[in-house]
Image (tube, rainbow, N blue to C red):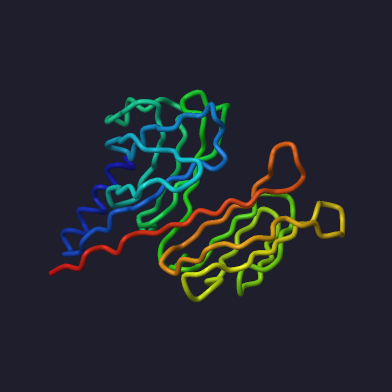
Amino acid sequence: MKLLLSLLAVSTAVALGQKATEHTCRILFLDGPDTAPETLHLFDGATSREVDLPRMNFSKVYKLRPGARTLRLLPAAVNDPEKVPPGAPSVTVSEDVTDFYLLVTSDPANTVAPVRMQVINAGSEHLKRGQMLWFNLTKNTVGGTVGSEKLVIQPNSRVTLDPPARDNLNYPVKLYFRIVGKEPLYPLCETKWRHDPRSRSVAFIISERGTRTPRVLVFPDYREAPPKEP
């Protein structure tokens, strides 16, 4: 039924002379363990394709058919909704989310594919070139300066920063964190990063195994401008 409604929505757009907008996405397996798969099959309700699950950078850009979609990650190719194993990891993408990041994290309890998925809207109205989207996935408050911008991000929250520099150059980063229940600030990192005004960036603050100090991971997203129509 969901597939039928999706197809009807696309058909209506075509009938009205509107060009349906396809989805584009990039995939990231955040902090994926070594034992987790490096590829899986992404099923969009009608067809599937093998996709990469990179740990330290975004995947290439994948294009998906227009309309609302329920995406599933599977260990093998499936082109029939009736053959999707029950309990397969899934996530819903609405029709208006035309560009997104598919964030994959480990879920060893899932016996179909040991992952879970989350959609992050990456449309230009949410994240522009030069900006940084920060996610704090820890219980620690983190703050400091990122180039020209001040960062304060509470536990389990997200913040969008304006470009930390104006040109393609290095900028200083100085961050601190606070341990739950304690007042002092502890150093997190003091370094320099490179700014690319053509790229968007997504930064994650995650808990590091075996230490109380969080870890910061930053992933740039640069895309070639589409060719102009003649």
Query: Which image quarter is the C terminus in?
Result: bottom left
- Tell me the quarter of the picture where residue 39 sits: top left
- Tell me the quarter of the picture where residue 125 sits: bottom left
Look at 33% across and 40% down and name the residue there: 44
- Tell me the quarter of the picture where residue 153 sits: bottom right
Task: Give how far across and how far down residue 169 sits, in percent.
Answer: 51, 69
Q: How many marks?
A: 0
**Side (left or right) of 144 relative to 223:** right
Look at 35% across and 59% down and name the residue there: 223
In the image shown, does 228 or 45 lie closer to the viewer?
A: 228
Look at 54% across and 30% down and name the residue there: 34
Look at 44% across and 26% down and name the residue there: 86
In the image shown, does 66 or 198 lie closer to the viewer?
A: 198
| Residue, far left | 230
In the image shown, does 99 or 56 lie closer to the viewer?
A: 56
Vertical placement of residue 103 versus 99, above or below: above
Task: Give how far across and how far down residue 170 sits, in percent.
Answer: 55, 67
Vertical placement of residue 217 versus 160, above or below: above
**Side (left or right) of 158 relative to 128:** right
Task: Give how far across and how far down residue 204 sits, in percent.
Answer: 59, 52
**Side (left or right) of 230 relative to 184:** left
Task: Give how far across and how far down residue 160 sits, in percent.
Answer: 56, 66
Query: Which image quarter is the N terminus in?
Result: top left
Vertical placement of residue 138 versus 152, above or below: above
